Image: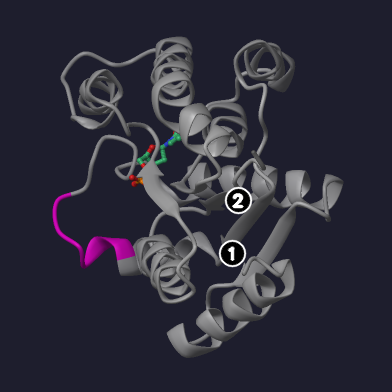
Amino acid sequence: MQQGIFITIEGIEGVGKSTAVNFIKDYFSKQQIPFIATREPGGTGIAEQIRKILLTPSEETMLPETELLLMFASRAQHIATVIKPALEVGQCVICDRFDDASFAYQGGGRGIDLAYIKNLDDWLVKRRPDITFLLDASPELGLMRAKHRGPQDRIEQEKTIFFDRVRAVYLERAKQDTKRFKIIDASQSIEAVQREIKAILDNLGLQ
Ligand code: TMP
């Protein structure tokens, strides 16, 4: 059986990832393409419990190393129990964030050596995404939008300069893999963003 397509959506906070994910889900539904939609950190019972630990603000400071290892712990669980089985039966997987986020946030944001992250990635992630939509906007714009969503989680509470570093690593990774990454200017209107996403999905010839 032919494997499903693996699509990930990335970007800093407030760039409209959820709207993009919903748009892609709608697109797949309309075209009657079998898919599952999931997210990271999370996507399974255990991985969602790890997500809670990662995102709940706490008085105890979480070490960058702890954060990185928990991200990959949840990812290992998610790949084995959700992503791999779906792709193997020909379902497409739409995943809100995946391993690029670990390079961007724990590498760029927290300053962990990217070589350590690559080691974990090579060990645990055998099937890489086929397409990654990188919704790109300045942290100033993203954080302003994110603030309107209500209480901020532990990572959202970081300062603009943290997200500048996250964004820089995302853009650097996109530059190194122009085939997989589709950079979308998220400062545009929702309609313009969706038009770009649709054009890219149309081009995949999925039907
Ligand atoms: P979300 O807000 O998109 O649901 O993502 C939760 C947070 O987790 C977000 O601030 C980005 C962060 N994150 C990482 O720092 N590293 C990772 O590997 C992933 C998947 C998410």
Q: Residue at x 83, y 55 (%)?
A: 178
Q: Residue at x 53, y 73 (%)?
A: 186
Q: Which SS does the magenta portion mostly show?
A: loop
The reply, left or right, for residue 129 in relation to residue 32 is right
Tag of residue 106: none
How far from the left and from the top, in percent, is residue 19? Answer: 37, 69
Label pair 2/1, CB-CB below 8 angstroms? yes
Instruction: Find ligand 1 in the image and state its quadrant.
Output: top left
Between the C-alphas of marks 2 and 1, the distance is: 8 Å
Q: Is residue 161 above or below residue 136?
A: above
Tag of residue 167: 2
Q: Which residue is mark 1?
A: 136
Residue 2, by quadrant, is top right
The residue range painted magenta reads: 146-151
| Amino acid marked by disc 2 | Arg
Q: Residue at x 62, y 22 (%)?
A: 125
The reply, left or right, for residue 90 in relation to residue 202 is left
Looking at the picture, tell me which residue is in the foreground, 2 or 28: 2
Q: Is residue 169 magenta?
A: no
